[in-house]
C-alpha cells in the first residue's frame, strides 16, 4: 500500500518539472514509518490445584473408670498402755573430808619510791632601785663597747665642730638590739650619723645583768665629740 502511494506521487509530480541539462535531479528521501509492534501478551500463570481435604482424625475413646465402693473400716478402741515405773537407785550421801588450808606465806613488797620532780626556783624579785643600778651598770658596759669604734669625722675636725649625741637604745633581755634613735642631737648631722654607726659596729652587745633579763628595756648612752686642742 505504501509503495503504490509513492509511485502515484512520482507520476503526478515529475511531469510538471522541467529539468535542465546542467542541473541534476533532486533526490527525495522518503522514510517509511514502521508500525508500532503490538505489546506482548502476558499470560497469567495457571492456578495451583487445590490441596485435597484431609478427613478429621477419629477421636480416641477414653477408658471408662468405674468407682469401686470403699471398704468399711472397723473402729477399734485405743488400748491404754500402763506406765512403766523404773525403780530409782538409792542415793547414799557421803560428806567430803575437809582438809585444813595450807598457810599462805606473805612476802613483803617494796613500794616504789615517789619520783621527785625538781622544780625550778622562782625567779628572784628585784626592786626598782636594783633595776636602776643594773641599768647604769649596763649603760657603762655599752659605752665601753661603743667607744671602741669611735671615729671623728674629718670634715668636723677641719671646721671645728664639737658636741654630744645622746642615743636611745632599746634592748631585749638577752642583749639583742631592737631599735636605736637620736634622743638629743649634737647640732651637727654628720656627728649624729657617726654616733649611730658606732652603735651598729658595737654589735653584739654584752649580756645584760640578771635584774634586766625579764623584759626589754631602754638605755640612753651619751656619745661625746670633742677636739683635743680646744
Image: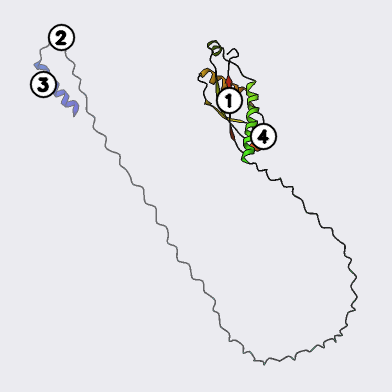
Residue extending furthest toward the top: 22
- The answer to whether 177 is drawn above or below residue 20 in the figure is below
Q: CA distance from mark 4 to mark 1?
A: 20 Å
User: Would residue 173 be seen by someone viewing this image from the given angle?
Assistant: no
The picture places residue 183, in percent across and down from the top left corner, at: 53, 27
Residue 42 in picture, x, y percent from top left: 32, 43
Look at the numbered discs 3 and 2 and tell me whether their residues touch, using CB distance below 8 Å.
no
Which of the two labelled residues, at mark 1 and mark 2, occupies the earlier sequence position? 2
Q: Residue at x 62, y 22 (%)?
A: 201
Quickly name the residue at label 2. Answer: 23
Kindly report the distance in space between the C-alpha atoms of the residues bearing marks 1 and 3.
162 Å
Q: Residues within 10 Å of mark 4 (few under 14, many from 20)?
A: some
* 84 to 200, vertically: above or below: below
Which quarter of the rendered picture does the C terminus lie within? top right
Q: Which mark is residue 123?
A: none
Q: Nearer the viewer, mark 1 or mark 2?
A: 1
User: Considering the numbered disc 4 on the image, is that residue within a helix, a strand or a loop?
Assistant: loop
Q: What's the residue at 55%, 22% (across, down)?
A: 164
Mark 1 — residue?
222
Q: Which mark is residue 12?
A: 3
Quadrant placement of the N terminus: top left
Within-10-Å neighbours for mark 3: few <14, some 14–19, many 20+: few
Inter-mark Cα distance, 1 to 2? 154 Å
Q: Residue at x 54, y 10 (%)?
A: 158
Percent x, y of residue 65: 55, 79
Q: Which mark is residue 209?
A: 4
Amino acid at each position: 500500500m505504501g509503495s503504490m502511494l509513492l509511485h502515484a506521487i512520482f507520476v503526478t509530480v515529475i511531469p510538471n518539472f522541467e529539468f535542465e541539462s546542467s542541473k541534476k535531479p533532486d533526490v527525495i528521501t522518503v522514510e517509511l514509518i514502521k508500525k508500532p509492534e503490538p505489546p506482548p501478551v502476558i499470560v497469567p500463570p495457571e492456578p495451583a490445584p487445590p490441596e485435597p481435604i484431609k478427613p478429621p482424625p477419629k477421636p480416641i475413646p477414653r477408658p471408662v473408670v468405674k468407682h469401686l465402693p470403699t471398704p468399711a473400716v472397723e473402729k477399734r478402741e485405743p488400748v491404754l498402755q500402763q506406765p512403766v515405773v523404773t525403780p530409782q537407785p538409792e542415793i547414799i550421801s557421803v560428806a567430803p573430808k575437809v582438809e585444813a588450808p595450807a598457810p599462805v606465806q606473805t612476802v613483803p613488797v617494796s613500794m616504789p619510791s615517789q619520783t621527785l620532780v625538781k622544780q625550778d626556783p622562782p625567779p628572784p624579785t628585784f626592786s626598782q632601785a636594783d633595776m636602776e643600778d643594773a641599768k647604769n651598770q649596763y649603760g657603762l658596759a655599752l659605752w665601753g663597747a661603743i667607744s671602741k669604734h669611735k671615729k671623728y669625722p674629718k670634715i668636723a675636725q677641719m671646721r671645728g665642730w664639737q658636741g654630744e649625741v645622746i642615743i636611745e637604745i632599746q634592748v631585749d633581755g638577752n642583749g639583742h638590739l631592737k631599735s636605736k634613735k637620736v634622743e638629743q642631737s649634737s647640732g651637727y648631722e654628720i656627728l649624729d650619723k657617726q654616733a649611730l654607726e658606732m652603735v651598729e659596729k658595737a654589735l653584739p652587745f654584752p649580756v645584760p645583768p640578771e635584774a634586766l633579763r625579764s623584759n626589754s628595756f631602754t638605755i640612753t648612752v651619751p656619745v661625746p665629740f670633742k677636739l683635743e686642742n680646744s
